[in-house]
Amino acid sequence: MNNELKKIILRKGKEESLGRFHPWIFSGAIHHTEGPAALEEGDTVEVLASDGRFLAIGHWQVGSIAVRVLTFKHQPINRAFWQKRLSAALDVRKTIGVADQESSCGKSPADKRNDIYRLVHGEGDNLPGLVIDIYGPTAVMQAHSVGMHVCREEIAAALREVMGDRLRAIYYKSETTLPFKAQLGQENAFLWGETANDIARENGLAFHIDWLKGQKTGFFVDQRDNRSLVEQYARGRNVLNMFCYTGGFSVYAMRGGARLVHSVDSSAKAIELVEANMELNFPGDTRHKAYAEDAFRFMEQMQEKYSLIILDPPAFAKHKDALRNALRGYTKLNAKAFEKIQPGGILFTFSCSQAVNKDQFRMAVFTAAAMAKRKVRILHQLHQPADHPVNIYHPEGEYLKGLVLYVE
Ligand code: SAH
């Protein structure tokens, strides 16, 4: 079994993190490689300790994370393997209650129906380098490693088997997530089927999903629970949704009974999406307005009339090096919101930068509150939802954090 696999032999003592089931092997841990041919990016490799002991099987690629571990067992990586992992991932989504609501007659009221969820969240589902989001009958699959790219057809076949009738199409969207230098010639395209229906439902609200050109897989699936919380607080409030993208938070605030909702994003395309999503759910409702503007400029000039503000900016720090600037960015942004929010206002503030941890983010927001000299209570501490699980052996998988604050 797996006799044909090329082998990576680690330096002495470098097997320790694998003993703790951490799924990454850094390039510095590798002593040498063995096999009938030179390693090629995306190869499935066997990882051995310096004494020849079997440790794991994973995908190899050039870069600081050299191997992403698929299994700590000696087993073939084939369609049956993918099927088992995908099936385990689907079971988790059923347990959480985000999948299969339509088919479980009467379980979920029509006004809360949900067919948008993340089926596979990389390391969190023991499938490092792979993301699969479900939008109604369409799965959008994204490879973040060359190995997953190489295996895409086999994974798609396994996905069809696991999802059965639920799926009508699989769209592959890895143009921007794979290492640029690997020159894989990848392009975004349907791997199977095709669908023109771009509307899916999150907790009963309808959204156009632009998997062809949109950010990530077309939608920010990770804010579902936090959007619901906004809905609960929105009644009678003047809501400002900064960095709105497709307007997820705005649509929930409307349903929650907000007095007015203003959505802001610097991208004109995003503003078109918000308007379209608003039209789907609240046609002709004049409570909503959207502005294509820079967030900082908008907040500088805005009146002090908002009583619920959402700040969900893009990742300010993509890498550790950018950390200090990122923290300054969060402080500056939040300080503006504290300065201008009405007394008794609620601030939802987020960071999706993996490089910024919970304490650092909290400190940046604390600094901002002090700068604005407002009295602030923490009402909720938020994080990514259960369909973005964190592998307990891979704490790096925790990335989304948020605070709900009551500003006196
Ligand atoms: N809150 C959104 C996701 C936000 S993604 C949701 O729930 O779906 C971040 C968004 O910030 C992107 O749409 C991007 O266009 C926008 N953006 C980035 N820089 C910005 C800036 N300086 N001012 C306003 N919007 C900005």
Image: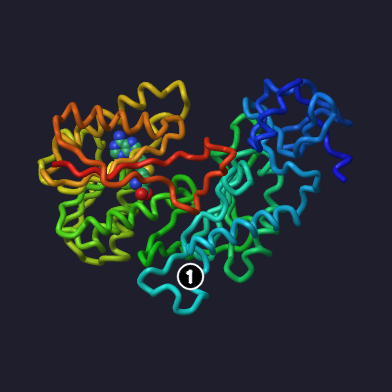
Residue 329 position, x and y percent, is 31, 28
- Residue at screen point 31% across, 29% down: 363
Q: Quadrant of ligand 1?
A: top left
- Please, what secondary structure does the residue beneath circle 1 have? loop
Dividing the picture into quadrants, the one containing residue 160 is bottom right
Q: Is residue 187 visible to us here?
A: no
Q: Residues within 10 Å of mark 1 (few under 14, many from 20)?
A: some
15 or 189: nearer the viewer: 15
Residue located at (15% from left, 52% from top): 238
Q: Is residue 124 left or right of residue 37?
A: left
- Which residue, given by chain and number where applicable, does mark 1 sit on? 101
What colour-coding does the image apply? rainbow
Q: Is mark 1 within 8 Å of ligand 1?
A: no
> How far across and how far down the image is residue 384, in percent?
43, 47
Identify which residue is drawn at 33% across, 57% down.
228
Residue 122, position in %: x, y? Answer: 58, 45
How many tags in the picture? 1
Q: Nearer the viewer, residue 83 or 371?
A: 371
The amino acid on which the numbered mark 1 sits, given as a three-letter code, is Gln
